[in-house]
Structures are given as structure tokens and as C-alpha cells.
Image (cartoon, coloured by chain):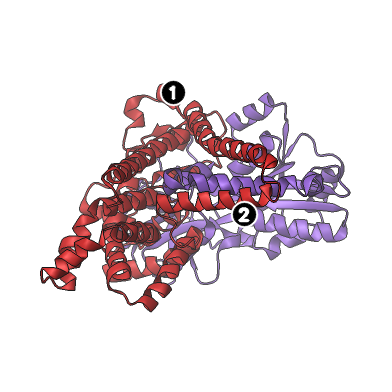
Amino acid sequence: MARPSSPNWALSLYRKILQRLLRRIAGSSETAGKSWSEFVIESSIRVLGFSTIGFVLLIFFFLLREGLPVLWEVSPGNLFGTRWYPTFDSFGTLPLILGSAYVTVAAILIALPLGVATAVFVREASPNWAREILKPLIEVLAGIPSVVLGFFGMHVLAPMVRNTLNAPTGLTAFTGAVLLAYMSLPTIISVAEDALDSVPKNYRDAALAMGATKWQTIWRVVVPAARSGIAMAVMLGMGRAIGETMAVMMVTGNAARMPLSLGSLFMPVRTMTATVAAEMGEVASGSVHYHALFGIGIILFILTFIINIVAASAIFKKRRKGGLR
Amino acid sequence: MTDIGIGQSGPSRPAFGLPLLAVCFALVMSAIALPGCSNEKPGAAQEPGGTGRTIENKGSDTLVNLALAWAEVYMRAHPDVSISVTGGGSGTGIAAMINGTVAIANASREMKPEEMAAAKANGIDPVEIIVARDAIAVVVNPSNPVQHLSLKQISAIYTGKIKNWVELGGEDRPIVLLSRESNSGTYVYFLENVIRMGDRKSELLFSPDTLLMPSSEGISSEIRQNPNAIGYDGLGYVTGDLKVISVSKSEHDPYIVPSAGTVKDGSYPIARPLYMYTAGKPAGQIKDYIEWILNGGQTLVAKLGFVPL
């Protein structure tokens, strides 16, 4: 998994594996057996491929079936109210939606400059040996389980935040945002790096030939040329951040209050994911609370779906123009 | 169920992981197909009816350590029986008992009428057994000078009426409220008997600023390092590095430190029974196990910081 980010790369790997599989299975009997075994393998892989789409659809229908009843069980005023207190029939989802949005946006604001700067360094400025070390390390970063990060956040980051900011508690939206930024960095770095990678060499050559310094070339030519790829990196990082559950649940304090001012960044919040994770174990299946939690699931699904569509459309638009830029 | 949320977390998957997924699927499928049926046996043996009998026991996080200790000691004496204990919260355990997935549910609160109705609708008649007693300790950071509080004061703190330690004779610091999540039986007990002070008509609720921690460890680790925080938890979970507050029923009553003695004589105001619920009248191995808990098992109760019957 050197570069799991590029769709072209994934496709070519898929083809390579397919070809190798076919060669091995078809083996020596190339003339008569090949077309038959090819057909079997191709169609079975096709079925498996489509089945993943089928699973997504099934999950979506399941979500709708379990979550939609909340729309007529709970009045809209209650559903979009400001108080989430499900044990006593207050199902205001607004603090949860805002909480998720607040933490996610803050995380991206932290991760974007760091991620793009790292990608620029890895792709444009670092010597070869440093790149060889950095790239696998960034991949390792993506593999750290979120519970581990959450534990680190709870015991190290939260006390640090409380002491340096002199806040009442360290379990704040900001703490969650820092952890989420860290978790979305690998995605942002590798996608942004691919975007930089696909900027044609003659752009750089032209800039250098005009007498631009290396810094000017990077900052005024390469990065702007890759901006839509970088935007896609941000969208994907955002999708990573909004769906994250465990680490967020451990460090944001989970108080369902409305984060309305800028100061709320340093106050506890409750995200949608943490709410579903914390409360799903308790509810009696089929109750209003149960449907409300699935309702939150639908909102999350739709949000990540929109983020995905935006990111994917950026890919397709650019691919038509040639290259992921 | 949370997996649904987590599954969404990688939007990268639908975007370009699909072909890879398909390959993975193919590999998994072939892995299953080749060794064939021989692989399926261990899964099936988990169901009752194997060589040893399995008792599934799930529920209250307050009770989980005690239930584990009981299970371990009992299994040592009865090697043919295996007992699996998991936590998750009283509501989780009761829901599992209603759904028929566990034989014994541990609970730190009584079953709610809705849960009773759901169980009856499912053809299950839960039997309640009190297995131990527990005090709920109110804890603060050791550097906090506040020594004692009345129930009324605690209620005012948790509803957000008192926001600074100065009002309670402490330092000028904001109060940070910590609580367990709402699936905890301790949460329900605390709401009904401390915040609402046992008044059934009361509609007082936890302040929306209350931090809901997913675990006991979350509460104690935050209190350990935050001098602003106040929290509550079962006495068995209070570690030596937290300061336990003495509590009184009202301003005129004496302030009582929670301990086995003060719970037993009824003077400590925030104490409650701990329950096990069985699906139907316990019979056979389960009956034997419960009887042992109520007699021989009680010696373990005090060891783990709870109060024996």
C-alpha cells in the first residue's frame, strides 16, 4: 500500500492482480480452458464487485427503515430543538449536528496547512532518502487505532490543553479537533501529494526557465496547478474526520450544549457519532430513542455522501481535462 | 450498531476502494471455500449443549468486576461450567436478557416498567435477585478543599445552579460536572435519588454542560488531573488518589463518609442494591450459581469494595 490514494493506481493494481490470477489459474491449458475459466473468474469477480454496491444500498435501506419513523414520532420542533435529552423525550439534534460540524471544521483548519505543507515537502523539497522514510511513516500514521489516539488524548492532550489555556476542563471541542486533524493528516497528505505529482514536469521547467526560484515555482505554479486535487484531499480528510467516533467520544466531553460562539471551541461538545456509539447499547429496539439514533445515522450518511460526491466530482472533472490536478 | 457510523468514516472507500475490496472479497471467499467445513466447528461449540455449559452474563459496568470475580471463583470449583461476563451498562444487559441472548443480566438499577413490558411481550418473565449493595461516592480532586456536601447542594451543583466552588467554601474555580453516559444504571440512580432527591414529580435534569464520560476510568482520570471537576461513581471504583466527599441528607444531618459500615446501617444517603435478573425462574446450573453468589460468593463482595447483603 504505497499509495492507496490514487484511483488510477488502485485500478492498475486491480488489473495486475486479475491478470496474475488469470494466468495462474488458466495455467498451461491456454487454448481451450482459457475462455471458459476467464468467463468464470470474470463473472464471479463482477458479482463480488457489485455485491459491495449492494451492501451499501442495503445498509442505506436499513438505515431509512429504522430511522425514518422518528420523523412522525417526534415533532419537528423537538427534533430540531436545542436540547438532547433522550431519556426524557427531548430529541433536539441541533447541538449534535453543530457539535460534529464544529469539531470537523476546526480539525480541517488545523490539518490543511500541515497536510499541504507536508505533501509539498515530501514531493518537492525533500531529498530522496527522506522521502523513502517519510512516506511509509505517513502510512503508519493512518494505521494507529483510534482508541489508542483517544487514550493519548485523554491522558496527555486534555491535561495539556487545560493547563495551557487555563480552561475549566481539557475535554473540549479543540482537543477533539487536534486529534481528528492528526487522524485525517495521512489522507490529506497522500492525496495532496498525488495531486502535486500529476502536475506536468514542463510546468516546473517553464517556471524555472523563467528565472523563478524553487520556492516561487512551488508556491506560485505547482500548488495552484494542483489546487483541485488539494481540495479533494480536504474533502476526503473531512469525511474521515466527521465519521470518527472513538477518539472523539473519549476527548470531547460529550456535553450536548449548543456550540454557538467562538469560545465554544474550548468547551465540551457532543458529536453525532459519539451519541450513537454511547447510546445505541442502551435503547430498546423499536423505541423512539432507537429511531432517533438511526435518524442521526441517516444525517451522518447523507453528510458523508455529499462530501464524497463533491470529492468524486472533482476527480472526474479533472480527469476529463487530463491528469489529476 | 456503531459500526455504521464508523463505516462511513472512510469515504475513501466508496470513491476508489471498490476494486480492491472486490479482490479482498475474492481472497476471503477462497480462504473460506478451501479448508471448508472443518473450520465451522469451533463457532458452533459456543452454543449451549457442547461439552461444558456456558452461562452468559452481561450488563452493569458497576457490577462487572464483581461478576468476573464471582465467575472465576465459581468456575474454579466447577470446571465443567463456563461463565462469560461482559459489561456495557445495565440497559445493555437487560436488553440482551429480553432478547434472549444472555441468561443473567447484571443491573445497578431496577428494571423499568417499559423493559418489563418488553420482556413479557417476548415471552420472558424476569426474576429479580439482589446480589450486593453499593454506595455511590461523590469524588473531587485531592487538591479541592471542599470536605462535605448535602444532597441539596449536590443537586444544585448538577443542575447548574451552583457554578463555582467559592459558593461551597472552596477556591474560586468553575465547577466541571462529570457523569456517566445515560446507559449507565448509576446515571439513572443518581438522577432519581440525588438530583431529584427521590421526588417522583420532580423534573430536574442534569445540566446540559455535564460531561458524559463513556467509562468509569474516564471519570477518574479526569478528576485525578482536573481540580475543577466533580464526579460520582460506585464506591468499588473509587481509587485512593481521588477525594471522597462526605454527604448528608440535609444541612442538619451529620455528614457521612461512604463505607461498608455506613451503607449497612443506612446512614450514608446514596446507597443502592445491585441486581441480577434471570430470564424466568433460575433453574439447573444457573440456580446453583445464583445460590452460591448469595451465600459463598458474598465474601468476595467486600474485597471488591462493595457491601455484602
Instruction: Please rate how many residues cluster around mark 1, counting C-alpha atoms within 10 Å: few if below 14, some from 14 to 19, many from 20.
Output: some
In the image, residue B186 above or below residue A75:
below
The image's mark for residue B134 is: 2
> What is the display colour for chain A?
red
Instruction: Identify the residue at horizontal 48%, vertical 58% (top origin).
Output: A146
> What is the display colour for chain B?
purple
Instruction: Please rate how many residues cluster around mark 2, counting C-alpha atoms within 10 Å: few if below 14, some from 14 to 19, many from 20.
Output: many
Kindly tell me whether residue A163 is visible in this rendering: yes
- The residue that label 1 is drawn on is A73
Instruction: Identify the residue at horizontal 87%, vertical 56% (top origin).
Output: B78
**As drawn, which residue projects farthest toward the front?**
A31
Nearer to me, A321 or A52? A321
Task: Find residue A93 and report its image quarter.
Answer: top left
Q: Position of residue B201 (x, y in %)?
A: 45, 33
Instruction: Identify the residue at horizontal 60%, vertical 36% (top origin).
Output: A43
Nearer to me, A162 or B140? A162
Estimate the spatial distance between the alpha carbons at disc 2 and disc 1, rounded to whole Å: 38 Å
